[in-house]
Image (spheres, rainbow, N blue to C red):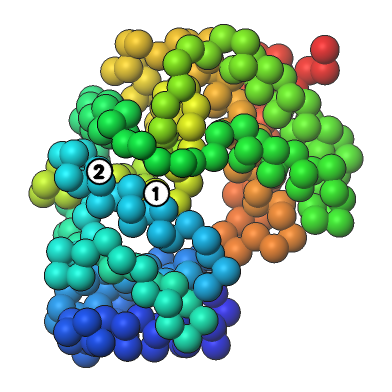
């Protein structure tokens, strides 16, 4: 967020927590991108703050609340206020349990895989409306075909990304098996290694699709502990995810920290995938 917007967002979160009986005398910014993530002390609650135009907060807290009740490995809404969305001063605010991260060791890939499997099992029990993963692919496609929205992309790179989206999407559609509710982006930034074990966060990206789409967001070695994943579908999903996140970093409105640098780095990886595996080759 811009400085002025961030100041207003912190004030809104502080006021919202205080109005619910959670005292705030110290605020620590944990993450600042399109949303602001804050730790509020001494109540020790985690606040997520987004512009009021954000329409997914209600879905996110509803899904997280249901998954907590199902015993899934997820970060819980703060039990003192429950899964609610507070609208205040142009922002939507959600309040979550704060978990102290484990800094002594990296999350082992087998623990990651087991937690993701448990998450998927819990998500299969939910009856919620969520978009299909192909809607997110279409969003990336629209960014690419509209040069005014991705002006920094060279034509050859734009075409490579378009071809990758098309080729990988077709293979997934042809080969994927059953579909279910997914996290949508269970990458390492959205799984915390805590004393309570691995806990997934950030359910705003929930969608429906094959489990391979979720596995594709995890480090490659996690898939070694997911024997039921179809290797061809997983390979296509990895190419698809890489092309999508690369495209989003070239969005003229992208606010991801160091987004353009990451976009250039990931674009090189898309070319490598094309040369090694053929995704991006027009057929």
**Which corner quadrant of the image does residue 87 belong to?**
bottom left
Position of the C terminus, as image quadrant, is top right
User: In the rendered image of this protein, does residue 137 appear above or below residue 23?
Assistant: above
In depth, the one of 160 and 200 nearer the eye is: 200
Which residue occupies 72% across, 19% down?
167
The quadrant in which residue 111 appears is: top left
| For residue 256, above or below residue 262 | below
Total numbered badges shown on the rendered structure: 2
Residue 217 place in picture, x, y as percent: 46, 34
Give the residue drawn at x 69%, y 44%: 139
Looking at the image, can residue 104 be seen?
A: no
Task: Left or right? Give the position of 50 relative to 102.
Answer: right
Q: Residue at 32%, 83% (x, y): give it.
A: 16
Q: Does 205 appear above or below 79?
A: above
Of badges 2 and 1, nearer the viewer stands 2
Say whether disc 2 or disc 1 marks the residue closer to the N-terminus.
Answer: 2
Marks 2/1 in contact by CB < 8 Å: the verdict is: yes
Could you say whether the residue bearing mark 1 is in a helix, strand or loop?
helix
The residue identified by callout 2 is: 67
Spatial CA span between label 2 and label 1? 11 Å
Query: Where does label 1 land, which residue?
Result: 203
Tell me if mark 1 has few (under 14), some (14-19) or many (20+) residues whose alpha carbon lies within 10 angstroms of its own. Answer: many
Image x and y of residue 144, in percent: 79, 43
Left or right: residue 163 compared with residue 256: right
Q: Is 32 above or below relative to 118?
A: below
Kindly identify the residue that appears in the image at 31 percent across and 66 percent down. Answer: 84
Label 2 secondary element? helix
The image quadrant of residue 106 is: top left
Q: Nearer the viewer, residue 94 or 82?
A: 82
| Location of the N terminus (image quadrant) | bottom right
Where does residue 109 sit, x and y in percent of width and height?
Answer: 27, 28
């Amino acid at each position: 967020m811009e400085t002025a917007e961030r100041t207003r967002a912190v004030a809104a979160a502080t006021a919202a927590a205080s109005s619910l009986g959670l005292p705030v005398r110290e605020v620590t910014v944990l993450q600042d991108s399109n949303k602001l993530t804050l730790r509020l002390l001494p109540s020790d609650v985690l606040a997520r703050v987004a512009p009021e135009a954000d329409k997914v907060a209600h879905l996110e807290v509803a899904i997280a609340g249901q998954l907590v009740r199902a015993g899934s490995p997820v970060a819980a809404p703060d039990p003192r206020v429950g899964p609610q969305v507070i609208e205040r001063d142009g922002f939507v605010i959600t309040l979550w349990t704060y978990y102290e991260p484990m800094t002594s060791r990296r999350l082992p890939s087998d623990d990651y895989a087991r937690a993701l499997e448990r998450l998927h099992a819990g998500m299969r029990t939910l009856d919620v409306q969520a978009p299909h993963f192909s809607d997110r692919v279409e969003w990336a496609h629209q960014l690419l075909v509209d040069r005014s929205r991705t002006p920094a992309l060279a034509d050859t790179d734009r075409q490579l990304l378009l071809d990758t989206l098309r080729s990988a999407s077709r293979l997934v559609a042809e080969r994927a098996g059953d579909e279910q509710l997914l996290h949508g982006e269970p990458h390492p930034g959205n799984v915390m290694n805590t004393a309570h074990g691995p806990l997934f966060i950030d359910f705003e990206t929930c969608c429906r699709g094959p489990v391979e789409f979720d596995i594709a967001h995890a480090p490659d070695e996690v898939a070694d502990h997911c024997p039921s994943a179809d290797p061809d579908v997983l390979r296509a999903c990895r190419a698809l995810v890489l092309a999508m996140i690369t495209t989003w970093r070239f969005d003229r409105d992208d606010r991801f920290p160091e987004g353009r640098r990451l976009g250039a780095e990931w674009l090189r990886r898309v070319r490598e995938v094309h040369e090694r595996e053929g995704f991006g080759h027009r057929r």
